[in-house]
Image (spheres, grey):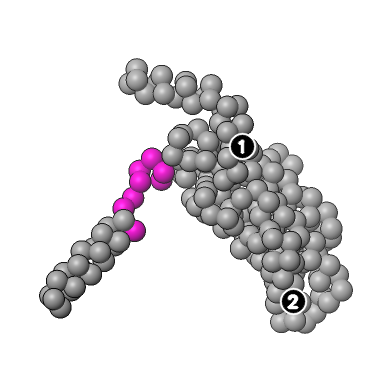
Amino acid sequence: MIKEKIKRNYRISKYIFYKETLVDRKETFWSFISSFIGVALIGYLQSLYLLPLENVFLIGSFGATCVLIYGAVQSPLAQPRNLIGGHLISAIIGVTVYKVIPEPIWVSAPLAVSLSIVAMQFTKSLHPPGGATALISVIGTDHIKSLGYLYVLFPVLSGVVILLLVALIFNNITHQRKYPTDGRFSRSIQWMVSPTKNRIQRLRKKM
């Protein structure tokens, strides 16, 4: 009886471990393509208007956002409401904290992050990279700090909109993905991107 339980638990553990470590190559491919295009577009726009050293449009929190909206598309934290709301709320709070309490940094930095977390929880727009967005507004370069509330629009809102548009297109090209999880909205997006999807399928058949 004990041996049977051990064997059964072993089989279950082995199956779970296998499923957790299984890599979906198609999923990985689309995660790479969408994240590359999203960040590349932001970087390209930055190169048109700013000097190479002024990395204002490409803030660090966008990297974490890409992991969620392109790599974990079904996560509640990756949905458009969380993506947009989380970043904007955190940016506003971060800038406000810096204007009110710029120093000492060991007070302003944690205060910006903590307040942004609470605000995202209250507004049901929790998005983990939002904490980084708030932190960057306090500890960022002098150029970022000098933006003031303009930081909320550029780079935060502009970057978020670009990343969202790319997510809406590439996360709905294949049947394996559906973004956002709201069925009606995602079906509308899939209908819009279906011509591109059909062209890709025809190219694959020719190859």
In the rendered picture of this protein, how many numbered marks are placed on residues? 2
27 falls in the magenta region: yes
Residue bearing the label numbered 1: 184
**Magenta-highlighted residues:** 20-29
Residue type at mark 2 is Leu
Residue depicted at 61% across the width and 31% down the height: 188
Residue depicted at 66% across the width and 55% down the height: 82
Residue depicted at 65% across the width and 52% down the height: 83
Q: Is residue 81 left or right of residue 17?
A: right
Quadrant of residue 29 in the image?
A: top left
Compared to 104, does 7 lie above or below? Answer: above
**Residue 14 in view:** yes
Give the quarter of the figure containing the N terminus. Answer: bottom left
Please provide percent x and percent y for residue 173. 50, 33
Give the quarter of the figure containing the C terminus. Answer: top left
Looking at the image, is mark 2 or mark 1 earlier in the sequence? 2
Give the label, 2 or 1, closer to the camera. 1
- Residue 67: image tag: none
Residue type at mark 1 is Arg
Please provide percent x and percent y for residue 143. 77, 59
Callout 2: SS: helix
Residue bearing the label numbered 2: 111
Compared to 156, does 129 lie above or below? Answer: below
Quadrant of residue 176 in the image?
A: top left
Please provide percent x and percent y for residue 16. 30, 61
Name the chief secondary structure element in magenta.
helix
